[in-house]
């Protein structure tokens, strides 16, 4: 597997690149002359080139969907519209005949500029191929949404320089909409006896927190309280979990920043805002029955621990 919860994309990409380099290194060893005649053919098959990425989101999206299906739901029935879009751009043959090819394609995709737009669409709760007659596999939907959130989290840490600074507010607003949408769906899932997709909401919160550092969003706490928590008080545990991520992302050593000085200024603002978070935690405890509302109690304790430890 290439995408583990909590792994960084840089680490995953490095491991993938190192594993890919090993067969090439073996070519230089003299023992190869003693290998069977069919070995070079096997080696060429192992080194098969992956499909080049497209800068057009409309072309790249179906390729990523098929690669995700190859990795996560290989036994699911393929969406004809996805196959048509793939085959049109690959000479009539599937570019992901093997799982390792799909794995490598997704790993390299995560470093491309077009991933910003494609992942925003992958986070949608609707069928991204807009084929009402096709029912998307539930496993694939869950995996493609988490893959998108994980990719955007890594890019908000390391690849923000791919975007003009003027585009960051619209990216933030889009991520907040996804956060509200998926957090609300998790609340409904609990009421409907469906498993809530809490890891996805947590990862989206981490993504927004990382972007907040990059764009020096110093009014983050008050803005989210006014625009997310007040209109949607039922999302309190998820908002507290997001607030927990804010100092953790500011303290991360994986951030690639435009200006290093901005980070220190941002951390100073966090220290000056700590009383706001502690006040929200106190209000959350007073307004709920901590003996019954376990999710809120856990979120409060986790949030307070993060701010006390880091800030």
Image: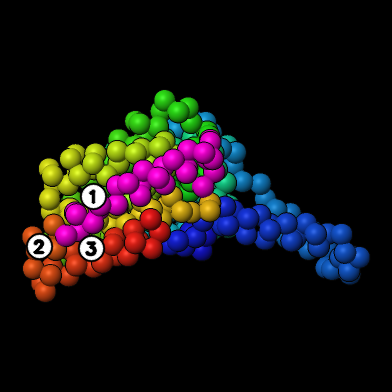
Against 299, residue 243 (above or below) is above
CA separation in Å, label 1 and label 2 = 15 Å
The kind of secondary structure element at disc 1 is helix
Q: Which mark is residue 189?
A: none
User: Which badge, 1 or 2, is on the more N-terminal residue?
Assistant: 1
Can you see residue 252? yes
Magenta run includes residue 141: no
Does residue 98 appear in this view?
A: no
Location of mark 3 (residue)? 300
Q: Quadrant of the C terminus?
A: bottom left
- Tell me how far mark 3 sits from mark 1, CA to CA: 13 Å
Q: Nearer the viewer, residue 52 or 205?
A: 205
The percent coordinates of residue 71 (x first, y second) are 47, 58
The image quadrant of residue 300 is bottom left
> In the rendering, which numbered label is found on residue 276?
1
What residue sits right under mark 2 in the picture?
286
Q: Residue at x 87, y 59 (%)?
A: 28
- Which one is closest to the eye, mark 1 or mark 2? 1
Q: Are marks 2 and 3 in contact (CB under 8 Å)?
A: no
The foreground one among 224 and 181 is: 224
SS for callout 2: helix
- The magenta segment: 255-282
Which of the 4 image quadrants contains residue 99?
Answer: bottom right
Q: Residue at x 52, y 39 (%)?
A: 261
């Amino acid at each position: 597997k290439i995408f583990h919860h909590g792994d960084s994309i840089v680490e995953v990409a490095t491991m993938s690149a190192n594993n890919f380099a090993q067969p090439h290194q073996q070519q230089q060893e003299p023992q190869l002359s003693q290998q069977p005649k069919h070995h070079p053919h096997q080696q060429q098959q192992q080194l098969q080139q992956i499909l080049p990425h497209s800068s057009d989101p409309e072309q790249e999206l179906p390729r990523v969907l098929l690669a995700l299906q190859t990795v996560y739901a290989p036994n699911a029935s393929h969406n004809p519209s996805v196959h048509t879009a793939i085959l049109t751009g690959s000479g009539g043959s599937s570019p992901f005949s093997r799982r390792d090819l799909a794995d490598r394609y997704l790993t390299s995709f995560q470093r491309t500029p077009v991933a910003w737009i494609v992942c925003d669409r992958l986070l949608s709760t609707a069928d991204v191929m807009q084929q009402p007659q096709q029912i998307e596999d539930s496993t694939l939907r869950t995996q493609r949404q988490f893959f998108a959130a994980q990719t955007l989290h890594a890019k908000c840490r390391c690849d923000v320089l791919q975007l003009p600074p003027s585009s960051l507010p619209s990216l933030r607003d889009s991520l907040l909409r996804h956060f509200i949408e998926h957090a609300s769906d998790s609340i409904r899932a609990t009421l409907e006896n469906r498993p809530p997709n809490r890891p996805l909401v947590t990862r989206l919160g981490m993504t927004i927190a990382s972007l907040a550092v990059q764009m020096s969003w110093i009014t983050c706490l008050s803005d989210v309280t006014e625009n997310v928590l007040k209109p949607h008080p039922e999302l309190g545990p998820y908002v507290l979990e997001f607030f927990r991520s804010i100092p953790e992302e500011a303290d991360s050593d994986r951030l690639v920043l435009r200006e290093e000085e901005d980070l220190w200024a941002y951390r100073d603002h966090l220290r000056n805002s700590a009383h706001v978070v502690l006040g929200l935690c106190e209000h959350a405890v007073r307004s709920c029955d901590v003996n019954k509302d376990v999710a809120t109690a856990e979120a409060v304790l986790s949030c307070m621990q993060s701010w006390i430890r880091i800030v």
